[in-house]
Amino acid sequence: MPVNLRGRSFLTLMDFSREEIRYLLDLSHDLKAKKRAGIKGSLLEGKNIVLLFEKTSTRTRCAFDVAAFDEGAHTTFLDQTNSQMNKKESLEDTARVLGRFYDGIEYRGFDQSVLEKLAKFSGVPVFNGLTDIDHPTQLLADLMTMEEHLDKPLNKCKVVFIGDTRNNMSLAWMIAASKLGFEYTGLGPRELFPDNGLIEQRNRAAAALGGSVRFTENPNDVREADVVYTDVWVSMGDEDKLEKHVKLLTPYRLNQELFSKLASPDGVFMHCLPSFHDLQTTFAKKADALGLDVREVTDEVFRDPRSVVFDEAENRMHTIKAVLIAVLG
C-alpha cells in the first residue's frame, strides 16, 4: 500500500507505522544521494516554515534551515528573545497566528504538551525538534546511520544506551525498538531507569516483532552490541542535577576498555551531540574547576575509527528533509 504522510505532524515515532518509518528512511537515503550529486531541488518551493526554539541548538537549527533551503522553502527563526509566545501571548493564540502565516511549525523545547497544543491549534503540521521526553528527528538520523554502517537489517541489530537511561534519547530508542523490533538495552544506574510500566509496555511491543527492551546496571549483561550509544549526563535545563549525575554515572563513562567489552567487532559508537569528550568547552572547564568530570565518553572512543558521530550529525539534515518533503512536499 502506498505511504502518504502529507499534512501529518511529526511529534513522535509512536504515531508512525513500521512501513511509514521505512518510507522516511528510504526517502532520506535518496535525498542524501541527490545532495551528493549536487542536484538542486524544488519539492518545497513556496513553502514557509517557522522554527520555534526554547532550547538552543546547532544541528537541529542548521539541519532544518539547510533541508528547507535545498528544496526551495523559507524558514523564520524565533527564540525566547524575539517572540511573544507564553509572555504577552498565549500558546494557543501564537499557534493560531503562526498557522495563518506558515505551512509548518518546528518546535524545540521542554514540554511535549507544547508540541501537541501547537498541532491542535495551528492547523498546520508540527515537527518535533526535541522535547524532554522524545527526539524523533534525531532517532530517524540514527537509524539511517545504522543502515549505512551495519551490514544487517535494523530488526537484527542490538543497541545499548549507556548513561542516563531515562533521558529523551533513551526514551526515543525505546520507541524505535517497539516499532522496528530490534534489541535495545539501557545500561546505567537503577536510580535513573525509566518507569517500570513504560519498560514493560515497550518490551511487549518490541517482543511482538522479535525484539526486546530491557535495562541493567551491569555491563557484563551486554555483549556484541552493534551500536554503543551515549549522551551527556545532564540535559538542558537540568544543570542543577549535575553533581548528582556525575557521581551516579562516572562508573559508566564510556572508555576504550568498556567500548570494546560492549561492542561487537563491527559495532559502532554513536552520540547525538554535543558531547563532552574532552575539556575544550566552557561548560566542561567550569565543571572541572568544581572537581566534576562531566565527560560521558573519552576522547579516545569519540575519535575511534568506529565512531560515526559526524555521519550521524550530517544525517540529521537528510532525514529532516525527508520528513518535510513527505509532509509538506
Image (cartoon, rainbow, N blue to C red):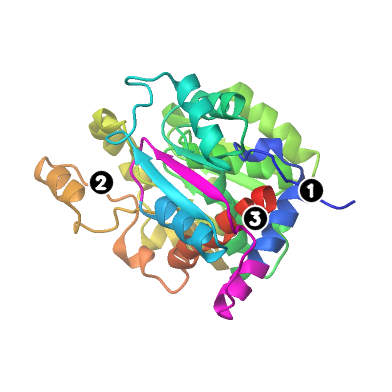
Helix or strand or loop: what does disc 1 sit on? Answer: loop
Q: Residue furthest bottom?
A: 37
Q: Which residue is mark 1?
A: 4
Residue bounds of the magenta highlight: 30-57
Residue 155 appears anywhere in the view: no
- Which callout, 2 or 3, points at the residue further toward the start of the chain? 2
- The numbered dot on residue 294 is 2
In x, y percent, where is residue 280? Answer: 19, 59
Look at label 1 and name its amino acid: Asn
- Which callout, 3 or 1, points at the residue further toward the start of the chain? 1
Left or right: where does residue 248 sit relative to residue 70? left
- The numbered dot on residue 325 is 3
Q: Residue furthest left?
A: 289
Q: Residue furthest right?
A: 1
In x, y percent, where is residue 308? Answer: 48, 67
- The numbered dot on residue 76 is none
Give whichever of 290, 145 is nearer the camera: 145
From mark 2 to mark 3, how far is it between C-alphas? 38 Å
From mark 1 to mark 2, how far is it between C-alphas? 44 Å
In x, y percent, where is residue 1? Answer: 90, 51
In x, y percent, where is residue 65? Answer: 45, 56
Look at label 2 and name its amino acid: Val
Q: Which residue is depicted at the point 61% across and 61% down? A: 144
